[in-house]
Image (tube, helix red, strand yellow):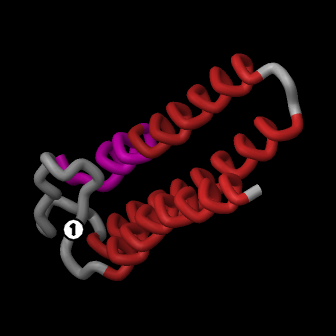
Amino acid sequence: MAETIVYLAISLLVSLIFVILGLKQYKSKTPVTINTGEKPPTEEELTSVTEWNHRHGRNFIILGCMLFVTLSVFVFCLERLENTTIQIVVFILVIFGEIAWVVIEDSVMKKKMIKK
């Protein structure tokens, strides 16, 4: 039981990183970006800086919440079900799916909101 509580506490802290990052991006006045190596577009390149930041922030908030749900369901299934190999494969696929969703959302926003 103690290891489950520690696991969930660590999962919550990791998820909160994304939620806090999302809140900071949501409130930012200058354009933000997902990738730390990527330069954000300038204000002149965007159709709306506010909408750009709100969408980025909202994506990170959703990612943080879904990450915590995924991690919680994973530990619950590990404790209750027997076939751990299938659970781990599904867990990895879900995590990659969440990351892919953020990347796809980012590319859709770039196509939609950056002026040509």
Q: Residue at x 24, y 81 (%)?
A: 29
Residue 94 position within the rendered picture, expressed as x and y whole percent measured from the top left: 61, 33
Q: Is residue 48 magenta?
A: no
Q: The N terminus lies in which quarter of the figure?
A: bottom right
Q: Which residues are magenta?
A: 104-116
21 or 78: which is nearer to us? 78
Looking at the image, residue 111 sits to the left or right of residue 62; the answer is left
Residue 78 occupies quadrant:
top right
Q: Residue at x 55, y 33 (%)?
A: 97
Residue 74 occupies quadrant:
top right
Residue 13 position within the rendered picture, expressed as x and y whole percent measured from the top left: 49, 65
Residue 108 position within the rendered picture, expressed as x and y whole percent measured from the top left: 40, 43
Q: Is residue 108 magenta?
A: yes
Q: Residue at x 27, y 71 (%)?
A: 49
In the image, is residue 86 above or below residue 78?
Answer: above
> Residue farthest to the front?
2
Looking at the image, residue 88 sits to the left or right of residue 111; the answer is right
Q: Secondary structure at mark 1?
A: loop
Q: Residue at x 41, y 68 (%)?
A: 22
In the image, is residue 49 above or below residue 104?
Answer: below
Q: Main secondary structure of the magenta part?
A: helix
In the image, is residue 17 above or below residue 89?
Answer: below
Residue 112 position within the rendered picture, expressed as x and y whole percent measured from the top left: 36, 49
Residue topped by disc 1:
31
How many residues crowd mark 1 within 10 Å: few (<14), some (14–19), many (20+)? Answer: many
In the image, is residue 8 above or below residue 76?
Answer: below
- Amino acid tagged 1: Pro
